[in-house]
């Protein structure tokens, strides 16, 4: 005997729908679905209710939540698309009713084991995409009617929202984690330079883009900066960004020139067939030579603020974005970067506004930068950002990187990791310091070279020690330069670097060299008196 | 690491060094220079005009390379500009006594002919 479908009162319908609205905000997806299925079970007076989600890659429906049919979920039931009951619902994208299971083709053995007699299934879809199936079943024979179908479809639509939101949140969380891990852990600390950066991904919905920046020191002593913008959004853009960042670091650290690096990157992207281009600017600064070199691949020009506060865009030929076409030549441009200058790298999200030309945006940028350069509180990047955007809700990602050089103090103290790739930077900083003190070229060379030898010694002493550091202390008093290199910690005794040649060089070039070595470590004190100038 | 530019001019391998040689790159530079040695070449020119500095281990490396070439009856020739800091350093450590040093690449190639 069949039971006619129950009459669903407005009240109960309302009750059913309300639960989903409040649940969306507070419960996990699993809990939301289970709660919903429970309500459906009681509202429609059925014995079982279940939701299966479509795994598009494999073309199967997987049981995700169930009430009265928990075994389906526990046993990880999978129904191939178009096969069986749920498969038919998904493939045909319309409700399906089974009056009597005995005469029907079902794939899932649990349904029969449970003793289900009648079933109703509806597709779960987001916009036009089928993402799953929701079905209900009874242990006694039942004639499902149009009201039942309509109500179940309504519930399925609400479930669809919850499922889609959960997927979006998950994707956003994954991408946010990826993006955070793609940015440099900390900006390097190099005497006489200051970095500041701001990174804000556009927040709402799935608008997560591909902006990034990077800063690192090269073993030659130059500093490398990158700012870029990958086309598109989401996890794919973030993963291309990651590849670009890694490749650029690798090529730069191998000592290739800027134009080579960008060309190699271009070839890499095109050859991996990602069809996803990116704009970028890559620059290298030599703080001692006060020289900046830049290559652009279709990116907006960096802004240079001179020591006197005047701001101008760097002029160069932009070149094509990378990842678009191979065989493109990139050109490097050189600029003077006297101490006290500032450089601002940014992505278009910082300046683009609707109903405004790029040029207007760039003018606003220059004005904001000039004003920000006047003050010294909080970071330069922060001040520029606040002047341009502050409370405005972001439509696009924003990334900013600012670099400034300042005069060095009379006394210099550096703590450096005991790795050979810090030597170039040490010589560069010492060169700046000595030049400011008025040392001749010979004197500058002598002190920098000897400090490098002593530092190499300290690094070799630390061989194998994890996270070892050493210090370099530089003072200047009454024409006399004193540089002290100190290693900390326990060292194994070793032959001096260069088999004695290093020490020979130091004793010849300097006025005095004093080496003290004990269990605490080694101290090398070097002095040189600079020829006085009138 | 520092890539060397290696080309053959008049049949002679010429390695142009682009970055100062210090502990960060001395081993890979030595490897790349050794690879540049042609089995039948009678010399190798290392052009140091673009760099400021070679550290003590780098100097040891050059001397080692020179010995290696000696065993093959080949010569190691350096290009170091006159009046440069590097020339001053090379003189202090007695490099000119051990190797041929020329002030320009042209002079080095000419000395070969």
Image: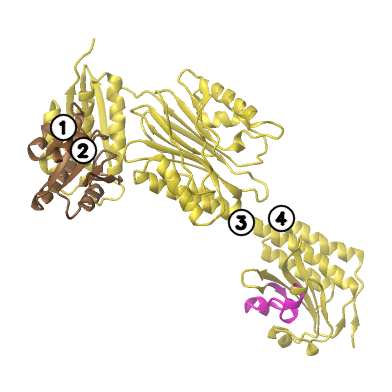
Looking at the picture, tell me which residue is in the foreground, A294 or A393: A294
| Residues tagged 4 and 1 counted as in contact (Cβ below 8 A) | no
Q: Secondary structure at mark 1?
A: helix
Q: Which chain is brown?
A: B
Tell me, yes or no, if residue A520 can be seen here: no
Chain letter of mark 1 equals: B
At a point 61% along the width and 25% down the height, the residue shown is A363
Judge left or right: residue B97 versus residue A263.
Answer: left
Which residue is nearer to you in this view: A441 or A156?
A: A441
The hue in which chain A appears in the rendered picture of the protein: yellow
Image coords of residue A472 (percent x, y): 26, 34
Q: In the rendered structure, which segment of residues is drawn in magenta?
A: A64-90
Give me the C-alpha separation between circle 1 and circle 2: 9 Å
Q: Are marks 3 and 1 on the same chain?
A: no
The residue at 60%/42% (across/down) is A397
CB under 8 Å between discs 3 and 1 = no
Q: Residue A70 colored magenta?
A: yes
- Residue B89 - label: 1
Residue located beneath label 4 in the image = A25
Q: Secondary structure at mark 2?
A: loop
Q: Within 10 Å of the Cα at label 1, are there few (<14), some (14-19), or many (20+) other Cα atoms? A: many
Q: Nearer the viewer, mark 2 or mark 4?
A: 2
Which label lies toward us, 3 or 1? Answer: 1
Q: Label 3 is found on which chain of the structure?
A: A
Residue B70, x across and y down, in percent: 9, 49
Left or right of A186, for residue A519: left
Q: Position of residue A411 (x, y in %)?
A: 29, 25
Q: Farthest top residue?
A: A534
In the rendered image, which residue does mark 3 sit on? A171
């Amino acid at each position: 005997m069949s039971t006619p479908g129950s009459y669903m009162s407005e009240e109960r319908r309302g009750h059913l729908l309300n639960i989903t609205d409040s649940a969306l905000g507070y419960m996990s997806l699993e809990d939301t679905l289970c709660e919903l299925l429970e309500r459906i079970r009681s509202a429609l007076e059925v014995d079982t209710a279940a939701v299966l989600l479509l795994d598009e890659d494999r073309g199967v429906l997987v049981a995700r939540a169930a009430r009265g049919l928990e075994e389906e979920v526990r046993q990880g039931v999978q129904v191939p698309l178009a096969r069986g009951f749920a498969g038919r619902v998904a493939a045909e994208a319309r409700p399906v009713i089974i009056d009597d299971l005995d005469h029907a083709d079902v794939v899932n053995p649990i349904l029969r084991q449970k003793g289900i007699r009648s079933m109703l299934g509806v597709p779960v879809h987001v916009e036009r995409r089928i993402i799953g199936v929701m079905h209900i079943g009874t242990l006694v024979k039942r004639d499902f009617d149009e009201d039942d179908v309509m109500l179940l479809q309504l519930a399925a639509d609400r479930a669809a929202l919850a499922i889609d939101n959960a997927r979006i949140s998950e994707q956003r969380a994954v991408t946010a984690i990826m993006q955070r891990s793609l940015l440099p852990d900390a900006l390097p600390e190099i005497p006489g330079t200051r970095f500041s950066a701001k990174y804000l991904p556009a927040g709402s919905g799935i608008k997560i883009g591909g902006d990034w920046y990077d800063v690192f020191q090269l073993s030659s002593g130059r500093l490398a900066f990158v700012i870029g913008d990958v086309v598109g959004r989401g996890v794919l853009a973030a993963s291309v960004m990651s590849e670009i960042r890694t490749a650029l670091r690798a090529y730069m650290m191998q000592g290739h020139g800027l134009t080579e690096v960008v060309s190699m990157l271009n070839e890499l992207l095109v050859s991996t067939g990602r069809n996803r281009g990116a704009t970028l600017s890559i620059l290298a600064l030599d703080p001692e030579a006060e020289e900046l070199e830049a290559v652009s691949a279709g990116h907006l020009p960096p802004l240079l603020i001179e020591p006197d506060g005047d701001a101008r865009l760097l002029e160069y030929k932009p070149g094509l974005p990378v990842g678009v076409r191979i065989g493109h030549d990139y050109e490097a441009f050189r600029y003077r970067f006297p101490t006290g200058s500032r450089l601002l790298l940014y992505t278009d999200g910082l300046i683009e506004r609707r109903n405004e030309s790029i040029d207007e945006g760039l003018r606003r940028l220059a004005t904001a930068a000039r004003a920000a350069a006047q003050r010294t509180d909080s970071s330069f990047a922060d001040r520029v950002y606040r002047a341009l955007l502050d409370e405005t809700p972001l439509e696009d990602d924003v990334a900013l990187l600012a670099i400034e050089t300042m005069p060095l103090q009379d006394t210099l103290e550096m703590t450096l990791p005991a790795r050979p790739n810090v030597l170039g930077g040490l010589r560069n900083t010492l060169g700046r310091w000595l030049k400011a003190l008025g040392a001749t070229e010979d004197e500058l060379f002598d002190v920098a070279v000897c400090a490098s030898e002593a530092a190499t010694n300290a690094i070799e002493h630390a061989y194998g020690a994890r996270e070892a550091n050493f210090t370099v202390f530089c003072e200047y008093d009454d024409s006399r330069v004193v540089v002290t290199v100190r290693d900390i910690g326990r060292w194994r005794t070793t032959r001096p670097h260069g088999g004695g040649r290093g020490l020979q060089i130091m004793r010849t070039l300097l006025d005095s060299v004093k080496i003290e070595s004990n269990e605490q470590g080694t101290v090398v004190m070097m002095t040189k008196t600079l020829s006085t100038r009138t | 690491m520092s890539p060397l530019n290696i080309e053959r001019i008049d049949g002679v391998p010429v390695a142009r060094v682009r970055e100062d040689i210090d502990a960060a790159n001395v081993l890979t530079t030595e490897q790349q220079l050794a690879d540049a040695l042609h089995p039948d070449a009678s010399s190798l020119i290392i052009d140091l005009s673009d760099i400021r500095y070679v550290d003590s281990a780098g100097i040891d490396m050059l001397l080692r390379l020179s010995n290696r070439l000696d065993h093959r009856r080949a010569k190691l020739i350096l290009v170091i500009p006159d009046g440069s800091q590097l020339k001053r350093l090379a003189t202090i450590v007695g490099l000119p006594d051990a190797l041929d040093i020329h002030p320009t690449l042209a002079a080095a190639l000419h000395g070969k002919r």
